[in-house]
Amino acid sequence: MTRFSLAAIASLILFFASAASAQLAIDDSPAAVEAGLRVFRSHCSRCHDLNGQGYRGRDLSQLAGRKTTAQLANVISRGIGAEMPATSLTPQQTSRVIAYLRSLGGPAIVETGDARRGENLFWNQYRCGRCHMVAGRGGRLGPDLTHVGAARSKSFLIREVRSPSDYISKGFEPVSVVTESGETVSGVRKNEDAFSLQMLDVSENLRNFLREEVRDVKRLDESFMPVYTRNQLSDADLDDLLRYLAALR
Amino acid sequence: MKRTLRFGLVLALIAAPIATSQNISSKDLLDGLKSTGRWLTYSGDYSGRRHSPLAQITPENVGSLRAEWIFQTGVPGKFEATPIVIDGTLYITGPDNHAWSLDARTGREIWHHRENLPANLNLCCGKVNRGFAVSGAKLYIAALDSNLVALDIKTGNVIGGIAIDDYRKGYTSTAAPLVVGNKIVVGTAGADYGARGFIDALDVNSGKRVWRFWTVPRPGEPGGETWAGNSWEHGGGSTWLTGTYDPELNLIYWGTGNPAPNLNGNARKGDNLYTSSLVALDADTGKLRWHYQFTPHDTHDWDANHIPVLADLTIDGRNRKVVMVANRNGFFYTLDRTTGEVLVAKTYAGTTWAKELDSRGRPILLPDNEPSEQGTFICPDMDGATNWMSPAFNPDTGLMYVMAREDCATYYSWAEDFREGQSYWGGNTTRKRGSGYGALRAIDPLTGSVKWEFKFPTPSMAGVLSTASGLLFTGDMEGNFMAFDARTGKNLWHLQTGSSIYAAPSTFTVNGRQFVVIPSGTALIALALPPGS
């Protein structure tokens, strides 16, 4: 195939992709977002979960903010490969779903609080950096937050601070292992199957266990991230913290 | 666009008998797994036991099992098929209606076929397909666009095709067809789009429909009274997994899926026959001989799309022809397959909706078992205590081997209008990430009790193969392909294949050596003992 024909095909694809979405105006009013939630629940939530955070399908809460309307409309109408089916949604339904998806994820919009004070709270007072890394500085037991402001919504971040066990990201599920010698090793689960377990222990050592070499493996319900109630972290401090996190992009 | 009847046009070209071993008669299908070099139907034979008489690979030597070849399809998506194998040649379908013929000794490709599919298919669960059926020198694939397509077994060329129904209404096909005599029996998917379910029998030569059994009766027909108003019109009841057949009784056994809308029972008051049921149909006429509804008025998407496993057992001193089903609703059932009488019913996984049946065979419902606007926590979850993955039955151990799932969900329901070609759920569920686990369980069909289990960190969707040497083979979501002692559940061997396993294993001999094959990821893996061992 010639270079010209490849370019022509690419142009055609782009043309049709943009043509398909050219008429799509995204109304982001609360009513439209609510309507989008209903369409999403009926047509998308079987795979992407009721809140869009993914189950069989991808976590869309981080994705939608980073894709154009044309890209989203194209995927919704045509599907992806052999796994995500095309849908028969009307243009209005598609527009509503995109409005809903945009309401889920980042970028986090935080207009109150003091980012500099929040940075100080993050690193010094609450020492979040013991477990979380930002731009190469910090720990590894929790998710890397270098771009968290671009990826997560304000409501998501508040939930992670106030009740972190509600949603634990894959690769950070708490687990404990009792070795043959009786030692208990706790950490976050990187991977597990019926025969082995890969863990980052609380001292950040990578530990690879064979199931036949350990006495017991327990999944823990509570995240290693502490719960910060209003008594432990005031709303004012949280505002400052969120302002700092929202600026991490 | 519907296909026109093309079987007749091409029949003249292929009617002459072809002197080749790749030509399968009705007797061959009735013989099932007697010929060790063959695997001729989805489950291996009509009984649905997925139990092979092969015994070269044993509990003692399975530790030496190794990859003989790996065929890379290059096609992403869930690889759910079981191959047809005929004396050294293998035929398998893959995602997106790709299909291949392979040299079973080497894994080298002989031909590749792909269906041309429309872009706007209504698919609940991926572009999957579970396999071919074979009759004569033709392979049959029920395609995603609800067409039955016949391929020339030697070339993979299309030699005929006929529309089963209209994909634009939500109908789609994923199951391997079942050839019974001179008929091809096919089911359909589509309940998640409100499509009314059916089972069709098509003439193996002309493709002409011989009979259709609607799984949702009209008003005035027997069972029609179990649907309020006109809810039957979009009542679901899909038939998306291959059934089984008893030649002596001449009955076809086929599971039916959920009523629609899946989670909103207010839209379809009544028992909603014959959804979430097992139906026994006369193979000649398609007439209903008996039915048993596992989950009356199902509001949890607990399809009964399972392999109905046939066996002859002695129960309370009487010889019984039985059909066994481990159901998505958490109960294991042993039924008399002549009459549909419930002989055994017992939970084999965690349930909160019901724990036992009444004297009429209906589940005794527990409180708080309905989806709601606010959400109701119910076990099992929507994917069920098992799902479509094949169980296996070993007549020597007398045990059924079931891939069980332990997970619960919060069920929500809401009102939803029907729109043709759009999903019609009326609700959905949420699950806490990582809350569930899976287990291979051995169940005594005489009592329903679980004899042993082997646990997996997450629920598996892989089927089970049993062999006469007392081995079981299965896979898991983490990518392990494993062998177990069928009597004790002890794990004897495993291979990390690198991708989740969504299919059931099968086994056959090639030049006298026993092979076991399993799809994993985008690959088909063939395993055998080292030559000469």
Image (cartoon, rainbow, N blue to C red):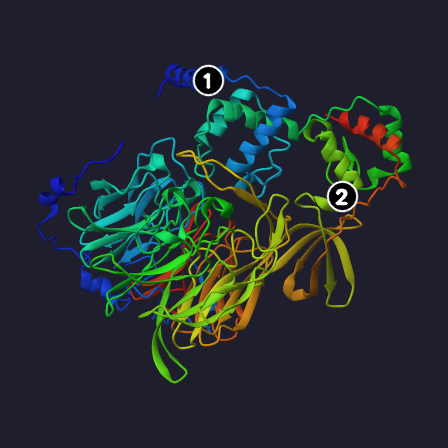
- x and y percentages locating residue B380 in the rendered image: 56, 57
Q: Residue furthest bottom?
A: B317
For badge 2, the amino acid type reads Pro
Marked residue chain, label 2: A
Residue to which mark 2 is pinned: A164
Q: Which of B315 and B530 is in front in this view?
A: B315
Q: Is residue B432 left or right of residue A69?
A: right
Marked residue chain, label 1: A
Q: In the rendered image, which quarter contains the N terminus of chain B?
A: top left
Name the mark on residue A14. 1
Quick one: SS at disc 2?
Answer: helix
C-alpha span from label 1 to label 2:
41 Å
Seen in the picture, residue B5 relative to B517 is either above or below; the reply is above
Q: Which of A6 and B364 is in front in this view?
A: B364
- x and y percentages locating residue B423 in the rendered image: 45, 38
Seen in the picture, residue B232 relative to A14 is either above or below; the reply is below
Label 1 in the same subunit as label 2: yes
Q: In this view, does B8 lie to the left or right of B466?
A: left
For badge 1, the amino acid type reads Leu
- x and y percentages locating residue B194 in the rendered image: 41, 41
Category of crowding for the residue at label 1, using alpha-carbon neighbours closer than 10 angstroms: few (below 14), some (14–19), many (at least 20) = some
Q: Are marks 1 and 2 in contact (CB under 8 Å)?
A: no
Quarter location, residue B293: bottom left
Quarter location, residue B10: top left
Quarter location, residue A219: bottom right
Residue at 74% across / 24% down in the picture? A109
Circle 1 or circle 2, nearest the eye: 2
Visible residue check, residue B265: yes
